[in-house]
């Protein structure tokens, strides 16, 4: 890990609430950063939980349950409480695949045993790595309303029978958060860490095109994953550095590279450290 003083005097925006990424926020402040943490996404349950409840009650009918985010685990736990049975009991002997350490940790905390955690820490990576094991199997997905179709399409291509349900909705920030976002002295922010394309889109929608141009021109974007990096470039960020994985070490490496790089216009692309 980088020297604990290397971020002294740097203002770093994290596009999540502190409780969503406590270890990242702790390490950034330990390294001397002045931290601004604001959630650019909100997560709420569906108005009608009946399809999710039915799937959880019949988990024994599935061969695999693929978890693509810790939020999916959290909402499944909520519904299990409403049903009146522990999620571990409902899961029975279904095999569980998880995307990333945070998702796997959430599953473990819920009392579940993860059979496979994707090395690539992406939904596409999980589908690719489990392709042989999932062929012809019955697979459950509980995901966000904003989840793309690449995972169920990849599973169907491998002849899996997929049940893809909306377990939660991903929404823009609330009014109070939007007001704070528009009042920030963005010109003094050195770097912003984004975890999804939706976070970048919501920032742009919250602060408006003129202020967003200032942000994109002056702030180094630290994007988690390729799709987020592409969204940052499309939003006009002149300096975009990509963390290949959502792991703490990868995020810190991209952040330090972004802050150390020459701030010349149009330095875009992956981490160039």
Image: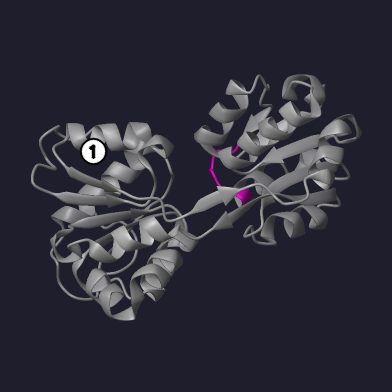
* Nearer the observer, 29 or 80: 80
Q: Is residue 207 visible?
A: yes
The residue under label 1 is 28
Left or right of 206 on screen, residue 96: right
Answer few, some or many: residues within 10 Å of disc 1's Cα (few below 14, many 20 plus, some between 14 and 19). Answer: many
* Residue depicted at x 86% and y 52%: 159
* Nearer the observer, 124 or 30: 30
Left or right of 112 on screen, residue 9: left
Residue 251, image quadrant? top left
Residue 68, image quadrant? top right
Q: Secondary structure at mark 1?
A: helix
Left or right of 120 on screen, residue 178: left
* Residue depicted at x 67% and y 33%: 78
Tell me residue 83's x, y (percent): 80, 29
Magenta stretch encompasses residue 121:
yes
* Residue depicted at x 56% and y 35%: 103
* Residue depicted at x 64% and y 44%: 126
Q: Which residues are magenta?
A: 118-123
Q: What is the residue that sits farthest to the front in this orientation?
A: 176
């Amino acid at each position: 890990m980088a020297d604990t003083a290397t971020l002294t005097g740097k203002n770093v925006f994290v596009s999540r609430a502190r409780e969503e990424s406590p270890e990242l926020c702790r390490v950034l402040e330990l390294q001397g950063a002045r931290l601004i943490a604001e959630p650019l996404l909100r997560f709420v349950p569906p108005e009608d939980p009946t399809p999710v409840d039915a799937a959880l009650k019949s988990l024994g009918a599935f061969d695999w349950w693929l978890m693509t985010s810790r939020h999916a685990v959290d909402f499944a736990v909520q519904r299990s409480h409403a049903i009146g049975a522990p999620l571990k009991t409902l899961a029975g002997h279904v095999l569980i695949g998880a995307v990333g350490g945070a998702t796997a940790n959430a599953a473990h905390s819920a009392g579940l045993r993860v059979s496979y955690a994707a090395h690539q820490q992406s939904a596409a990576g999980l589908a690719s790595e489990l392709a042989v094991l999932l062929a012809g199997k019955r697979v459950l997905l509980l995901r966000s309303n904003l989840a793309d179709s690449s995972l169920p399409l990849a599973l169907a291509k491998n002849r899996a029978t997929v049940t893809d349900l909306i377990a939660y909705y991903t929404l823009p920030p609330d009014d109070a958060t939007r007001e704070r976002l528009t009042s920030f002295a963005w010109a003094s922010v050195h770097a912003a860490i984004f975890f999804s394309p939706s976070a970048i889109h919501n920032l742009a929608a919250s602060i408006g095109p003129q202020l967003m141009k200032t942000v994109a021109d002056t702030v180094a974007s630290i994007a988690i994953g390729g799709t987020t990096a592409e969204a940052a470039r499309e939003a006009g960020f002149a300096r975009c550095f990509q963390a290949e994985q959502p792991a703490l070490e990868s995020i810190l490496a991209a952040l330090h590279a972004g802050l150390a790089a020459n701030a010349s216009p149009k330095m875009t692309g992956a981490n160039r450290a």
